[in-house]
Structure formats: C-alpha cells, structure tokens
Image (cartoon, helix red, strand yellow):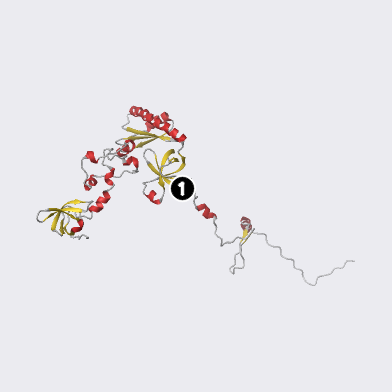
Amino acid sequence: MQLLLEPDHETVLPTPPPPPDDSSASDSSATPDAISTPDVRGKDQPTTKGSPVDDSAPDNSSLKKQTPSASKREYVCRYGSMRNLGVMTAKQSFRYGDEVVIHSERGTEIATVLCEATPAAIEGIHEPTEGRILRRLDSTDRGDWSQMSEMTRRDLDACQPHVEKLRLPMQLIDVERLLGGERVIVYFVAEGRVDFRALVKLLGREFQTRIEMRQIGIRDEAKLLADYGDCGQEVCCSRFLSKMPPVSMKMAKLQRASLDPSKISGRCGRLKCCLRYEFDTYESLASELPPVGSKILTREGTCRVAAQDILAAQLIVTTEDKRRIMIPSGDVIEILKVGEGSPSRGKKRKK
C-alpha cells in the first residue's frame, strides 16, 4: 500500500549560480598564477603558486643587465694615413705602443694603442670615432700589410692615367688600402669642387672594391707626405695633431719671432703650427704688462714704455731725462696713460 504524505511547509529549491561573465573569465585566465584581492583593512594578501617571495629582497637581475662586463676596456687608438683617433673597446688589456687590428667605421685596419680612454683623454679628442679591437698584430697580419703597402705604391700610378683621360682638375696625393680590403681611399687636392663620379666607376673596375675619394687641404698634404721639420723632429701634423689649428701672423709678432717667411713657414708652406702652442701663454703674460707707449709711474719717476720682455716680465722704459732702462713689471706703481688695446686708464698695478 502506497501512502501519500503532504508536507507541512513549502520546500524552496536553491537558485543556481549565474553563468560566469566573459570579461571576468578572460581576466582570470590571463593571470592564473597570481590572484590578488586587495583589502583596505589589509586582511587579504596576494597569493602565488610555489614558494613565497620576499618583496623586501632586492632584485639583482636588472643590475646584472645594466652593469657592464668587468673585462670590457676602452683604449684610444691611432689609425689610418690621416692619423685618425678613435675610442676602441677591447676584451683584453693593452699597453702604449701596441700594434693591434681594429674594426673601425671604415673596415678592418691596423692601429696603434695610445692610452686608456679616460674621460680626460676623450675630452681632448676632436670628434673621436668608435670601433673595437679585434686582436694583436701577428706575423700573418704584418705580411698582409707589407703586401698592401707595395700595392699602394702602384695604385697611385694606376689612378693617374684615368685622371688625365677625364681631364679632371685635381692632383692625386696618396692612395690608402685597408687591411681587410673593404675599400681604397684616394686623397687629392683641388682648388674647388670636382665631379669625380666617372673616375670612381673606372677605379672601381680597376681595383674591384669600394672607392672613396677624399679631398684634402695643403696642410693635410704635408701630413701625408712630410717627414721632418726644421727643428729636427717629425712634423707635428704627422706625429700627434688630429686637427689643424688656425695660425695667424699676430701670433708670430707677439712671440717676437722672425717675420721672414722662410723661417716661420712649415713644410706645407703655411705658418708653423708650433706658433700657436705658446700663444695663449704669451697673451696671458702680455695682458699683465702695460703696452708699448703707456705712461707709467715707477720708483724712477714718470716713464714711458718703449718695449716689453714678455717671458721675463720686464719693461724697457724711457725716463724723463731720456735714459732707457729695464725695470721689472713689479716696479710699476700706476698706469697714468695706457696705450691702444689695453685695460682702462688709471688702473693700478698689483705689486
């Protein structure tokens, strides 16, 4: 027999949960390993899978990426026929005078190590180039470079017929080859601009490599070809100068140099670069002396400056009784009347 019992109260079924939102599902799937539930009261903390991570510990991974390799070094090297200066990176240490093989912006070539690339050394270089040192110069490199040097002697003779054929207004000075053979550089002088595009095509077929035409000045010509100066030393432009400083006749006059062109001209036919080396010192010392023609008050009385000895800091003056004597600059008490191009009138000299 089947009994039917009616319930005394109404049975309420639980409401099924709503379907998950697509946006929340995508967010949770994007970061399955970490779920962060921030709470203003600080009860909940982010949880991650695996071992807990201490946030207070410093992250050294970024420091390792930013810290340069301890074995990386930089050196100032001189290379090329024009004595270019560049900062080269290296993986080993080198000393002054070491001959190395470098890779510059021009290609593979031979260079000489001058010093470490300190900030003071780099500051003294005008527009240094960059590159890297590949290795020390070995016997194989020396043999290859010897063959390159012999080829450059013939290259100049090979270029001249093409210049004459095209009737170009230029004078070939030198030809430079790189150790790696990436290019051939032709140096020439000309009064103005020269259209050498046809010449480059002919030389490209002649040498079967890239051709670079470089127009230079008179001073650069001496830098390539000159050997020794009047002083008996190797010419400065070939030995250490990387930029030709301007030199004027004013520098020669201030230093009391001979104005004979044959004595103050260098191998390039221009004023010697060494006239500029001490010009700043002469100019600084001369600014401390009253100029020629100034009326000064000294221990000998009122005098007029007739001449200066800049290095000795002495003056040749004419006294009121027409005597010419030499006095040290410290004996000048006051400048009564200054000459042209001097400080203000009445300036007292410091004893």
Q: Residue furthest left?
A: 321
- Which residue lies at the image location 36% right of the left edge and 37% below the top edge? 214
Q: Is residue 43 above or below residue 135?
A: below
Q: Position of residue 147 (x, y in %)?
A: 42, 31
Answer whether residue 340 is visible to the viewer in this image: no
Q: Residue furthest bottom?
A: 8
Foreground residue, 335 or 97? 97
Q: How many marks?
A: 1
Q: Residues within 10 Å of mark 1 (few under 14, many from 20)?
A: some
- Which residue lies at the image location 50% right of the left edge and 53% below the top edge? 66
> Which amino acid lies under the numbered mark 1 shown in the image of this protein?
Arg
Q: Position of residue 146 (x, y in %)?
A: 42, 32
Q: Is residue 9 above or below residue 96?
A: below
Q: Position of residue 139 (x, y in %)?
A: 46, 35
Foreground residue, 177 or 202? 177
Q: Is residue 244 above or below residue 310?
A: above
* Residue 97 occupies quadrant: top left
- Which residue lies at the image location 36% right of the left edge and 28% below the top edge? 157
* Residue 288 occupies quadrant: bottom left
* Residue 30 occupies quadrant: bottom right
Foreground residue, 337 or 266? 266
Q: Secondary structure at mark 1?
A: strand
Q: Is residue 167 left or right of residue 76?
A: left
The residue where tag 1 is placed is 73
Q: Position of residue 279 (x, y in %)?
A: 26, 48
Q: Quadrant of the N terminus?
A: bottom right
Q: Quadrant of the C terminus?
A: bottom left
Foreground residue, 287 or 345? 287
Answer whether residue 275 is visible to the viewer in this image: yes
